[in-house]
Amino acid sequence: MNDHAAINLDVQTLLEERHALKQQGGTLPLGRGHWIGQFQGKRRGHGSEYDDLRHYSTGDDARHIDWKASARTGVLHTRLYREEKDIRTTVVADLRDAMFTGSIELQAVRVCKVAARLLWQATQGSSRANVLVVTDAGISLSEPGSAQQAAIDACALLARQFTSNQTRLNAAAGTDTDTASSSAHVSTDPIVEFNIDTGINGYRALNLDTVSQWLIEHPGKLSTLLWISDFQHCGAHFDRNIAMLSETADNVAIVVEDPLLKSGLPGGHYGYTSHNQTNTVAHDNPVPENRSVSLGYRASEQLRAALVMAATQRQARFEQLMVPMLSIEDGIDSIVTTLRHEQFLP
């Protein structure tokens, strides 16, 4: 993989995810999802899609009487139709500071690519979609829409937040990494940003339960929430909030984590950079210091066992919540196919 592409991201890369969509039109059977078009709503109503036939009941609309079935059986029958609703898909993209790490590719890069593909799939399927970007500074939300411009605006928001976070982290680390520009001309007028209380020092770790609580308080027309994260630092109330959200919307967890977290670190000598809070040039500008640590065989095995336990606990958490969990290791194409098959995407 190109080193530059592994650590940097621009809006053009996300726009190009549109061309990676597979042509699957007409290959999936009619479903019972939320979608307009090839998918039907969950509830019966006054839509145009025929659903069922039953005996006439007092109060039924005479326009819905099936005269052919009534004449054939000698009993009045009423046609039932599937309600059609315009419901929104929200892609929740985790771009907190911890996601800007990776042994092969930054996890934040992978999050953005998956999010972009899902947004393009949703909008091309005529579903209203938007992105909610999570950073340690707060959340940013793009305007929902079913047209191409909605996906473009969402990709622009992803690229802008990625670049902003990366620039800040590079400055804090004292590095001068060349980041790709995301200043392509894209309309950002419909983008609205919401700042969550970040404390006195400006930035702190933002737990996902804060995000889920915000979604509970601002439900809108949610239908499906596609969470893309490593699901670390979920917070004490995440499970409770997801259970509450599941009453009105479908939730899907898409796990993005570094491959090294499955195998652990082999024994060896590792260097890292630490910011010494006591040795500072300015009061609020810690000086980075290069340090190292040795990892022996026993410590390596303990780390590997801890990682396996964390992964097992994460899987058990979503099973208990009855939330489907997918992994980035399965590939983006596989994720999109699964979501379409399970009718979380059109």
Image (cartoon, rainbow, N blue to C red):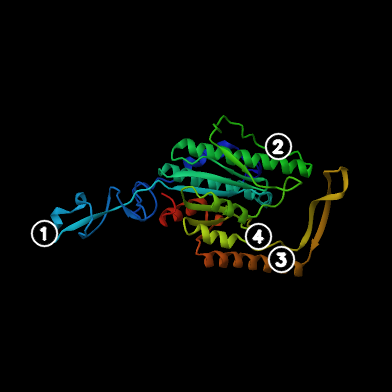
Q: Residue at point 76% right, 67% down?
A: 299
Q: Amino acid at mark 4?
A: Leu
Q: CA distance from mark 2 to mark 4?
A: 27 Å
Q: Picture coordinates of residue 26 (x, y %)? A: 33, 48
Asked if disc 4 and disc 3 are in contact, CB closer than 8 Å, the reply is no
Residue linked to disc 3: 303
Q: Residues within 10 Å of mark 4 (few under 14, many from 20)?
A: some
Q: Residue at point 68% right, 42% down?
A: 165
Residue linked to disc 1: 72
Q: Picture coordinates of residue 326 (x, y %)? A: 52, 58
Q: Earlier in the sequence, mark 1 or mark 2?
A: 1
Residue linked to disc 4: 261
Front-most of 165 and 174? 165
Q: Amino acid at mark 3?
A: Leu
Q: CA distance from mark 1 to mark 2?
A: 76 Å
Which-is-in-front pick, marks 4 and 1? 1
Q: Picture coordinates of residue 203 (x, y %)? A: 72, 47
